[in-house]
Image (cartoon, rainbow, N blue to C red):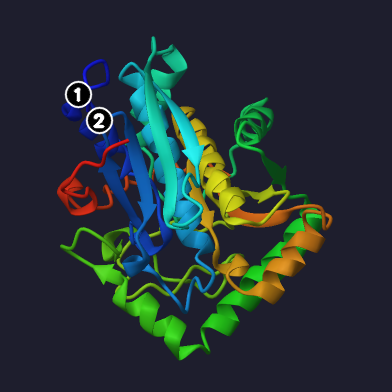
């Protein structure tokens, strides 16, 4: 980058944390470019999942999470990110142009940046320990900063939501194209993308929320009590590409905030990948007033549960275009 901007090593340090963001099936559907004065985020259409994610909503959520991770990491390194979303109307895959401005990191920014490497997608059962007072309000506030709403699911709404999640699992279970995609993107052992077998539990017939049937699942979930995870639905007032990108940023803010206070998290999108079922969640949980983008499981991992291993990521060189662009 030009004089007065962060050096490339600093930018790459932030990008190395950005690519730790969660993504659908760990496809990591992003590409990055470093310009003279800005950093650019692109959606990578070669990582698409046409059967699972036909309208690329999950991909945009994933890229939004990476965008927020980058902003958090940059702030902790002393550079505030000014984000211009969808800067090129002629290129819908150009998701963001990010200006970096000198900035004094706050303790919160440093803490959230540190949470990036600790966050895991924990698909196991959670314990029945209560949520700390005030945490709902904090998470709602963090999501709201990106124009998203975060709605805790009531007991009555939970029953409806569980029915919808089960219906999605049953419908996907009869879809050979979906099952083929799920198989080729899971059961991984030594690859830098896809869902590792070591981080995926086998579905159990008594589970309230059925897990995806990832191939070769090896994660042991030793819990014998019902899952006590809380469910929250993150939604947006509109459903265009910008809204979905911002929903991904809000999701990242929620996940990192939860990680920072020691909570376990898991983002669920299967029930929202089928248009009819997504409509049911919109009406049944969000009062037909917002578009559901992701369901968040939240709670405490059992104290006896072993730490999850880190999910691999592609090397930065694989997602960073090798040429600079002029701003």
Residue that badge 2 annotates: 11
Tell whether 155 sits left or right of 7: right
Q: Is residue 36 above or below residue 273?
A: above
Tag shown at residue 184 = none
With 277 as the anchor, is 83 left or right in this view? left
Q: Position of residue 205 (x, y in %)?
A: 54, 75
- Which secondary structure lies at badge 2? helix
The quarter in which the C terminus is drawn is top left
Residue appearing at x 43%, y 86% in the figure: 177
Relative to 257, 306 lies left or right: left
**Which residue is at 38% across, 78% downward?**
181
One can see residue 229 in this view: no
Whether residue 243 can be seen here: yes
Whether residues under marks 1 and 2 lie with C-beta atoms below 8 angstroms apart, the answer is yes
Vertical position of residue 310 compared to residue 171: above or below: above
Q: Secondary structure at mark 1?
A: loop
Q: Quadrant of residue 186?
A: bottom left
Measuring from the top left, give residue 170's x and y in whole percent: 58, 82
Residue 282 or residue 240, whichever sits in front: 240
> For the N terminus, which image quadrant?
top left
- Distance in Å between CA atoms under marks 1 and 2: 7 Å
> Which residue appears farthest toward the top when viewing the image?
104
- The residue positioned 42% from the left and 57% from the top of the image is 93
Q: Would you name the residue on which mark 1 appears?
A: 7
Query: Looking at the picture, how far across and down is residue 255, in whole percent?
Result: 49, 40
């Amino acid at each position: 980058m030009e004089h007065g901007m962060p050096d490339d090593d600093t930018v790459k340090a932030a990008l190395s944390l950005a690519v730790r963001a969660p993504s659908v099936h760990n496809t990591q559907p992003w590409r990055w470019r470093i310009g003279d004065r800005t950093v650019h985020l692109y959606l990578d259409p070669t990582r698409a999942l046409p059967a699972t994610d036909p309208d690329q909503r999950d991909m945009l959520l994933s890229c939004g999470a990476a965008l927020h991770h980058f902003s958090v990491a940059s702030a902790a390194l002393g550079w505030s990110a000014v984000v211009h979303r969808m800067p090129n109307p002629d290129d819908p895959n150009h998701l963001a142009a990010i200006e970096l401005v000198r900035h004094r990191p706050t303790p919160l920014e440093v803490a959230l940046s540190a949470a990036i490497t600790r966050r895991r997608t924990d698909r196991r059962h959670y314990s029945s320990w209560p949520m700390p007072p005030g945490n709902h309000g904090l998470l709602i506030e963090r999501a709201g900063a990106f124009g998203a709403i975060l709605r805790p699911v009531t007991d009555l709404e939970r029953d409806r939501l569980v029915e919808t999640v089960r219906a999605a699992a049953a419908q996907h279970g009869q879809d050979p194209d979906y099952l083929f995609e799920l198989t080729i993107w899971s059961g991984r052992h030594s690859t830098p993308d896809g869902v590792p077998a070591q981080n995926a539990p086998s579905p159990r017939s008594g589970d309230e929320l059925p897990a995806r049937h990832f191939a070769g699942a090896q994660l042991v979930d030793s819990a014998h009590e019902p899952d006590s995870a809380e469910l929250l639905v993150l939604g947006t007032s509109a459903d265009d590409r910008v809204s979905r990108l911002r929903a991904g940023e809000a999701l990242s803010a929620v996940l990192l905030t939860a990680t920072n206070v020691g909570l376990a998290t898991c983002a669920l999108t299967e029930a929202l990948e089928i248009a009819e079922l997504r409509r049911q969640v919109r009406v049944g949980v969000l009062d037909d007033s917002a578009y559901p983008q992701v369901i968040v499981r939240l709670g405490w991992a059992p104290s006896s549960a072993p730490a999850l291993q880190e999910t691999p990521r592609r090397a930065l060189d694989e997602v960073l275009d090798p040429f600079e662009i002029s701003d």
